[in-house]
Amino acid sequence: NAGVTQTPKFQVLKTGQSMTLQCAQDMNHNSMYWYRQDPGMGLRLIYYSASEGTTDKGEVPNGYNVSRLNKREFSLRLESAAPSQTSVYFCASSSGLGTDTQYFGPGTRLTVL
Amino acid sequence: RKEVEQDPGPFNVPEGATVAFNCTYSNSASQSFFWYRQDCRKEPKLLMSVYSSGNEDGRFTAQLNRASQYISLLIRDSKLSDSATYLCVVNRVYGQNFVFGPGTRLSVLP
């Protein structure tokens, strides 16, 4: 099992460019999440999907869109990148049932110039 | 006030020391609690879940006090490999499931 995978690992964008971060999990989890992590700020939730077919905003959704493509895949799109979106992005998944724990992907390091 | 708060750190301790991390949470409806470990430039990984009765995993002991809304992590006989940031995580029943504390950085020195 690969667990949670993310692509790409690194990306540099110019202001105004768009891109999609991909995330997939092979643990048959119901719930998936996108976080960003900035120095001194901790992990902040951007969007989450409690189950296939549903998505909800987290703490910092502005400037992002998401798609829960199927049970395995959850993508994050930046339509018009801004320097403030320079960050490390983590995807995570959890079963969504009972006493739940999250499993994280390796992260995408994004720089917006 | 943040929903989950932790000791600000960093903690610099010698090898073999015992170190304790504290975490408080504000939402009394929180249902489950965890400690995660994050190495520099890596993803967070589950260290241990925290149960009301307290639980131990080798050198690590976690405690939960629901009345005081307080969680702790004790590391005994610190190793160099314990150097990392420790994240306190609380799982709500509804809405955004997992809320992360800001983390406490630990450096174990030779």
Image (cartoon, coloured by chain):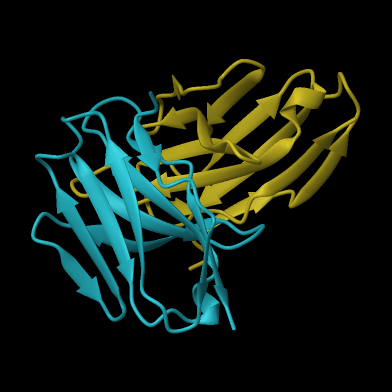
Above or below for A46 versus B49:
above
Question: x and y percent of residue B81 in the render?
Answer: 53, 78
Above or below for B23 versus B53:
above
Can residue A100 be seen by looking at this rendering? no
For image coordinates 74% across by 19% down, the residue present is A79
User: In this rendering, would A30 be left or right of B63?
Assistant: right
User: In this rendering, would B95 be left or right of B17?
Assistant: left
Above or below for A72 versus B46:
above
How many numbered circles are shown? 0
For image coordinates 58% across by 36% down, the residue present is A41
Question: x and y percent of residue B67 in the render?
Answer: 9, 39
Quarter containing the C terminus of chain B: bottom right
User: In this rendering, would A72 be left or right of A86?
Assistant: left
User: In this rendering, would B86 be left or right of A97?
Assistant: right
Question: x and y percent of residue A61 in the render?
Answer: 56, 19
For image coordinates 49% across by 73% down, the residue present is B82
Query: Which of A13/B59 is in front?
Result: B59
Quarter containing the N terminus of chain B: top left
Q: Residue B78's quadrant in the figure?
A: bottom left
Can residue B63 be seen by looking at this rendering? yes
Rendering colour (chain B):
cyan
Query: Which of B101/A87 is in front?
Result: B101
For image coordinates 12% across by 43% down, the residue present is B66
Rendering colour (chain A):
yellow
Query: Which of A95/B7 is in front?
Result: B7
